[in-house]
Amino acid sequence: MNSLRDIGEDALIQRLIRLVPRDPSPLAGPGDDCAVIDPGPGSAMLQLLKTDAMVAGIHFLPDSPARAVGWKAAARVVSDFAAMGGRPERFLITLALDPQSPLCWAEELYRGIGDCLSAFDAVLAGGETSSVPAGSAAVISIAATGCVPRDQLVLRSTGKPGHALFVTGTLGGSLRGKHLSFSPRSKEANWLVSNYKPTAMMDVSDGLAKDLPRLAAASGCGFELDRERLPVTPGCTLAQALGDGEDFELLFACEEARSAAMLAAWPAAFPDLPLSRIGQLVASGSGETLAGGWDHFGPQVS
């Protein structure tokens, strides 16, 4: 009998979604950063739907500051909206805790969630609480709605061979604390889609080694990676930049004709955040492969 570890996270998702009814005509569904719902041809805005979960011992340590954990729980969702060119609106929070958990921990968690919602103009719409068996890991699950102007939606699946690949910020070192304090690249994504609309985009959550092949495959492309141009976080190795994950930077493709102008304009808009060209998309079946990154069920490759 196969186990989840035998097939890995991506294959598991593909098997599971075949077992339930699906929207016959979504603009984007399973496999992108958010689901995209079209309210109708008269609407200038598209609706974004996102759900995300964090588990103690997997996404944060039990002794991590609760307020930072709350920030991360909400910011992960904001980052996914940004990856589609959109912004967050309403959040639903499900919290499952050991009944012996300190009350102050839960309150600090919600203060952290509130910090993030306030920073990105979102609001709490509701939620649920549940107990877990004594000694079990805490679970924080978030469902949220967002929106994106129809002409600014960016998917993973619309890149083309020859399009240049870029990443914001630096990669690697998330376990040093960056994964609890990152800022979703919402402003940066809005600037991009308004001025130099990417042809494909996602956020780097499972590591570039895992997410770049996902973006290329979604676009029906291969990729070539210029490792010498990778923006490695100071003190980290190239392997950590490729595989650590939880960078929450934007990875995107851009038409070659727009790339030079975008790179020239970026420093004036975001002087404290690097933007690096790291390669290009190529025809399917060519290019290179990458191993590593985070897989919840597959064997971990460092």
Image (spheres, rainbow, N blue to C red):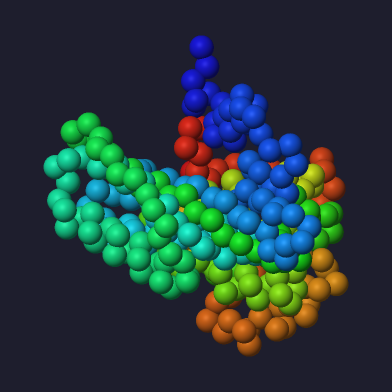
Q: Is residue 89 visible?
A: yes
Residue shown at 74%/55% (left/top)? 40
Residue at 40% x, 60% y is: 124
Q: Position of residue 51 (x, y in %)?
A: 50, 47
Q: Quadrant of residue 39?
A: bottom right
The location of residue 155, given as percent across then percent down, is: 71, 54
- 228 with respect to 186 (left or right): right
Q: Does 159 sit left or right of 12 as displayed?
A: right
Query: What residue is shown at x 71% (from left), y 45% (from top)?
Result: 26
- Count of numbered tags: 0
Residue 236 placement, left or right of 230: left
Residue 207 in view of the camera: no
On the image, the x and y values in percent for residue 115 come to 36, 69
Left or right relative to 6: residue 113: left
Residue 89's place in the image compared with 140, above or below, is below
Residue in front for this viewpoint, 49 or 15: 49
Q: Is residue 299 above or below residue 42?
A: above
Residue nearest the observer in this picture, 73 or 225:
73
At x 54%, y 50%, the residue is 50
